[in-house]
Image: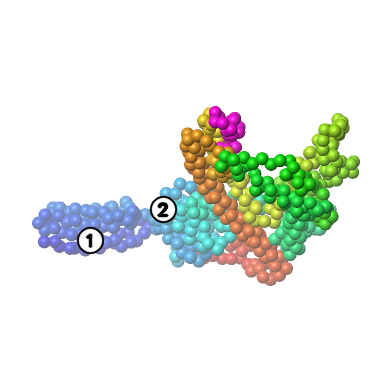
């Protein structure tokens, strides 16, 4: 038989007044009573056993003594009450204090009431809440961080604004959850500060307003409508220059296109009757010189495009030159401008043209080079050899003209993301290079010792075998080098499989870096838009000061706590 008894006792421990209740179950056969009382400190229940010799008054005295010991000093020691932007939050102090990293919340909970008033914007005696005038959406995620241990970034909020809120709450970006870790872009503020410092250097300079305007037009295509027009014109010149350079290598667009038809017939003849096509069936095709000369034409590459392409080259180079000089003149930091990567590309795209033009003024050009190297009957002097060396250098420099295509990186977000991915993936690329070098050296050496004794073998040395190994390990497989032995084919199979494995390891990490670089580009665009919006807002506030709630003042700096516990704002 069980008897339920309910007791209620009022305790006046310290300065707090609370009502406590206990639930007792009396077991008649055992003459013992089990009483359970809630513990408001750790939310646990305290059980008592009352023997048959003890009275209810003795049990009440013991329970009152226990409540005197466990009664908290203030209610906020258990549940911390906070109001952020008009939204109330309740969080257990224990949840915040267990976090390893110190933050504003840990300081608030550890401080007393007077110190909390100094760290907060107000205190309500009615709700016993400390008030903070901050972003509510960020506060939701901050409170969730102390509950779940993971910090996330709210959607539809500027990254820089989110960073400012984290600084206020004294939280680090390294506490972000893995899904939001790519938002840890500590280099963004640094780049913004560098840009702002660069713009400040125009202050006090000669023609600072015009120079700053021209600098923004030429360096930031998204800054204004004129900047977009300028970038469009530059892109048109870049494409025109590249297309003209490509067309200048074709025989149809040479100064004398008479033999263009014979050029194509000549190469088609070689494609149809190459020895590579006949080596698989064991036959060999012999082509006599009479058959080659039957057309009376032997094509030689020429560097004499027609007048239209030459004029197009001059116009494009003139634009690139004027653009480079203008950028240099208006730049605030001349030395940094010269050593910047994109400006070096601009320099190398125009420098070969002027060097070749200067040598042509001394009678050294491509046609003269062909005459000097045309045959043994010409007696080449030491001076002529010097000029030949100079022209060879010019030919190498002329190859750099194709670097003009990289000028598009100034206006292409995709190329910028690609460059950022390469810079961020240097560790993965170096690891991939080491894998390829190790595999190439190993399999080349093995194939050399296996295939070197075969007749007409292409593996006559280890460097010669490296070409086959590189094309095999990278899964390209040109097929120009054949493996004859069975053991060699087995090794080639293993090399192909190892090549797939070697490429798979770092490629996945590089793809991840590419995704991060793409996300960073999006965030940078958001920061740029936020910066433009801030400038526009500042202009409007200066232009229309009546829009300010407190003209000339920051309301956050003119707030004090009244004696009644409410917030007062001094206007």
Q: Is mark 1 on a helix, strand or loop?
A: strand
Does the magenta run of residues contain 324?
Answer: no
x%, y% of residue 562? 54, 63
Does residue 459 appear anywhere in the picture? no
Q: Which residue lies furthest to the left in this view?
A: 29
Q: Residue at x 71, y 46 (%)?
A: 341
- The residue labelled by disc 2 is 95
Q: Determine whether 124 is above or below 119 in the image.
A: below
Q: How many marks?
A: 2
Q: Which residue is drawn at 18% across and 58% down?
A: 56
Q: How far apart are marks 1 and 2 (CA)?
A: 30 Å
Q: Is mark 2 on a helix, strand or loop?
A: helix
x%, y% of residue 416? 65, 52
Pick the residue in front: 558 or 293.
Answer: 293
- Quarter residue 284 falls in: top right
Pick the residue in front: 158 or 358.
Answer: 358
Numbered label attached to residue 178: none
Q: Determine whether 237 is above or below 445 in the image.
A: below
- Quarter residue 472 falls in: top right
Of callouts 1 and 2, the N-terminal one: 1
Placement of the C terminus among the 4 image quadrants: bottom right
- Quarter residue 216 falls in: bottom right
- The residue labelled by disc 1 is 23
Give the magenta-colored segment's residue range: 452-471
């Amino acid at each position: 038989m069980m008897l339920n008894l309910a007791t209620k006792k009022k305790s006046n421990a310290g300065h707090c007044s609370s009502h406590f209740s206990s639930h007792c179950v009396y077991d008649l056969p055992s003459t013992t009573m089990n009483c359970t009382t809630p513990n408001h400190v750790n939310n646990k229940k305290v059980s008592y056993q009352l023997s048959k010799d003890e009275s209810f008054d003795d049990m009440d005295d013991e329970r009152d003594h226990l409540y005197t010991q466990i009664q908290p000093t203030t209610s906020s020691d258990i549940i911390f009450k906070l109001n952020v932007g008009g939204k109330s939050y309740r969080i257990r102090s224990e949840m915040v204090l267990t976090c390893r990293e110190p933050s504003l919340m840990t300081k608030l909970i550890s401080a007393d009431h007077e110190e909390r008033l100094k760290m907060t914007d107000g205190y309500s005696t009615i709700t016993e809440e400390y008030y903070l005038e901050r972003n509510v959406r960020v506060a939701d995620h901050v409170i969730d961080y102390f509950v779940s241990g993971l910090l996330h970034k709210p959607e539809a909020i500027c990254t820089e604004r989110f960073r400012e809120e984290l600084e206020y709450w004294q939280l680090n970006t390294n506490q972000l959850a893995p899904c939001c870790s790519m938002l840890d872009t500590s280099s963004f503020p640094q780049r913004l500060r560098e840009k702002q410092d660069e713009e400040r250097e125009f202050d006090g300079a000669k023609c600072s307003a015009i120079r700053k305007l021209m600098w923004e037009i030429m360096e930031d295509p998204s800054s204004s409508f004129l900047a977009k027009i300028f970038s469009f014109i530059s892109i048109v010149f870049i494409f025109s220059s590249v297309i003209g350079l490509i067309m200048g290598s074709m025989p149809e667009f040479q100064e004398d296109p008479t033999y263009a038809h014979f050029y194509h017939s000549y190469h088609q003849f070689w494609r149809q009757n190459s020895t590579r096509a006949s080596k698989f069936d064991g036959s060999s095709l012999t082509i006599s010189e009479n058959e080659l000369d039957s057309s009376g034409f032997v094509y030689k590459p020429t560097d004499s495009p027609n007048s239209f392409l030459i004029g197009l080259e001059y116009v494009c180079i003139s634009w690139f030159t004027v653009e480079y000089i203008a950028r240099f003149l208006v730049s605030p930091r001349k030395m940094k401008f010269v050593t910047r990567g994109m400006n070096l590309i601009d320099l190398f795209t125009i420098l070969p043209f002027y060097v070749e033009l200067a040598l042509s003024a001394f009678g050294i050009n491509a046609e003269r080079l062909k005459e000097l190297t045309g045959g043994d009957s010409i007696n080449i002097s030491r001076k002529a050899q010097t000029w030949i060396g100079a022209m060879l250098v010019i030919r190498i420099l002329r190859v750099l003209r194709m670097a003009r295509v990289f000028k598009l990186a100034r206006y292409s977000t995709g190329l910028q993301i690609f460059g950022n991915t390469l810079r961020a993936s240097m560790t993965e690329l170096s690891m991939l290079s080491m894998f390829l070098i190790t595999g190439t050296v190993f399999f080349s050496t093995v194939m050399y010792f296996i295939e070197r004794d075969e007749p007409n073998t292409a593996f006559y040395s280890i460097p010669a075998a490296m070409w086959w190994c590189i094309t095999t390990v990278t899964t390209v497989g040109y097929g120009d080098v054949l493996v004859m032995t069975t053991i060699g084919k087995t090794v080639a199979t293993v090399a192909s499989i190892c090549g797939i494995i070697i490429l798979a390891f770092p490629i996945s990490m590089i793809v991840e870096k590419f995704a991060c670089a793409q996300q960073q580009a999006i965030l940078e665009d958001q920061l740029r838009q936020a910066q433009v919006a801030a400038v526009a807002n500042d202009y409007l506030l200066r232009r229309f000061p009546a829009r300010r709630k407190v003209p000339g003042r920051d309301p956050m700096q003119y707030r004090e706590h009244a004696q009644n516990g409410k917030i007062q704002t001094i206007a």
